[in-house]
Image: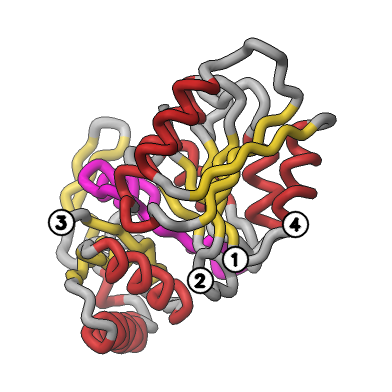
Amino acid sequence: MKNILLAINAEKLIISDIDFGCYLAKMSGSRLTGVFLENQLFSETPTLKTVVGIPYVEAIVASDLPDYHEKLTVFDENVRIFNEICTRCGVQHSVHLDKATPMHEIISESRFGDLLIINPAINFDDASDDDYSNFTTDVLANSECPVLVAPVKFEGIDEIVFTYDGGAAEAFAIRQFANIFPELDEEKISVVQVNKQDGSGDEHNLKQYLCMHYTNVSFHQLNGNPNQELFKFLFQRKNALVVIGAYSRSKISRNFFPSAADRLIKSLSIPVFIAHY
């Protein structure tokens, strides 16, 4: 059984993310783990700290904050809703309550996850209302398991688009996706190559590999700016899921840079699967 993690802001539950997670977990027979993240500034008990080598006790605790009990009520209700939806969908599930720094907590969780689902807008800054948060970009760059960015609106998967430029990062992402979701073997597969050079890459090996996992595979050769051409190709697709290689700039494949993933996430409501190599 695989473990699919769903990153959740404990204060701001997004029902569509749970529905998306349940869809994938049920399809793949996986457990859905709701990782409830809370940016708790103070510990729940007095804590011994040190400043310039001098120890002192931090006497302010979380329960001293004026909105502590109201937030606790919201957290409990959000956990109840998560459990209720998963039960209704027939999905095995569990809950992790993480109260330390959200970034540290979610990266630690990803170390033992098979897949992490994240909403592009998730953040822990009350002043931020960006559709694509800095928190998400940091998670994409540092996650220790593949990440699937959830769409704003999900209506199913009719096509899977693999980006491929002959590099190891893209090939690794394709293999990761195939291993996590073997149930999608009958979906339409489109392999997108931009500015392909004759005789470059291991196209024969790729075709052979994909035919072992999928029944309907086609290749599409595009010319021009890789990021722009990929965007135009996906803009014409409905209910597509795109698979891209490593996100961090130091590891990204030659053609598809982080800006490609950024633009897709910001502009198109489609799931984006990203795996590090």
Amino acid type, mark 1: Asn
Q: Residue at x 56, y 26 (%)?
A: 252
Q: How many numbered discs, if any?
A: 4
Circle on res. 116: none
Q: Which of marks 3 and 2 is in front?
A: 2
Name the secondary structure under disc 4: helix
Say which residue label 3 marks: 1
Residue 112 position within the rendered picture, expressed as x and y whole percent measured from the top left: 21, 45
Residue 178 as seen in the image, left or right of residue 242 = left
Please state which amino acid type lies under the numbered disc 2.
Gly
- Which residue carries the number 4 mark? 235
Report the amino acid beneath label 3.
Met
Graded by Cα atoms within 10 Å as few (under 14), some (14 to 19) or many (20 or more), the crowding at tag 2 reads: some
- Vertical order, 27 against 177 (above or below): below
Could you tell whether 210 is left or right of 225 in the image? Answer: left
Q: Distance between the residues labelled 3 and 4?
A: 34 Å
Q: Mark 1 points at which residue?
A: 239
- Count neighbours of disc 4 (C-alpha within 10 A) and say few if under 14, some if 14 to 19, many if 20 or more: some
3 and 1 marks in contact (CB < 8 Å): no
Q: Where is residue 106 in the image (x, y as percent from the top left)?
A: 33, 51
Quadrant including the N terminus: bottom left
Is tag 4's residue or tag 2's residue first in the polypeptide sequence?
A: 2
Q: Which of marks 3 and 4 is nearer the N terminus?
A: 3
